[in-house]
Amino acid sequence: MSVKVDLDTLSDTLRDFSFAYLVTVGDDFRAHTVAVDPTLTSGALHIGGVGNSTRRNASAHPAVTLVWPPRAPGGYTLIVDGAAVVGDDSLRVEPTGAVLHRPAAPGTATGPGCGDDCVPL
């Protein structure tokens, strides 16, 4: 099931982050992770200059994840799941879900069975 991502909120949120990690998987389902600098344009995240492994993985398994680490300890990590579309030497990711995530501080109320502080976008 797809979760609607508020692209206006995602665009605003991206201003607080610098680079991301793109996670794809190969036919052996081992993760392949590379640092990228995506830009949000026309509702999709565009990534230029992807390598052969990333291109091959995203072609075979288009469900990918982008992870923007927090700028400071204790900050939120931005995680965006999406569907990859491979171009000649680029990749377009159409977001299907997005969340700001971090471990909850001690004493913070969280959902049952969850110890994390999450903000869906």
Image: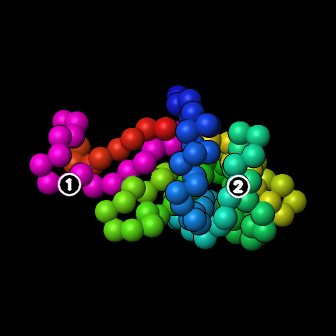
| Image quadrant assignment for residue 21 | bottom right
Residue under label 1: 105
Q: Decide: is 54 above or below 110.
A: below
Which label number is shown at residue 39?
2
Q: Nearer the viewer, residue 22 or 57?
A: 22
Q: In the image, is 74 to the left or to the right of 10?
A: left
Three-letter residue code for mark 2:
Thr
Q: Decide: is 97 above or below 18.
A: above
x%, y% of residue 37? 67, 64
Which label number is shown at residue 118?
none
Residue at the spot 87% in from the left edge and 60% down from the top edge: 88
Residue at the spot 33% in from the left edge and 54% down from the top edge: 102
Residue at the spot 45% in from the left edge and 44% down from the top edge: 99
SS of the residue under disc 1: loop
Seen as rendered, the residue at the extreme left is 107
- For the image, the number of numbered tags is 2
Three-letter residue code for mark 1:
Ala
SS of the residue under disc 2: strand
Seen as rendered, the residue at the extreme right is 88
104 in magenta: yes
Q: Nearer the viewer, residue 119 or 115?
A: 119
Q: Nearer the viewer, residue 110 or 55?
A: 110
Residue range of the region highlighted in magenta in the rendering: 96-113
Q: Would residue 81 be visible to someone looking at this image?
A: no
Tell me if mark 2 has few (under 14), some (14-19) or many (20+) residues whose alpha carbon lies within 10 angstroms of its own: some
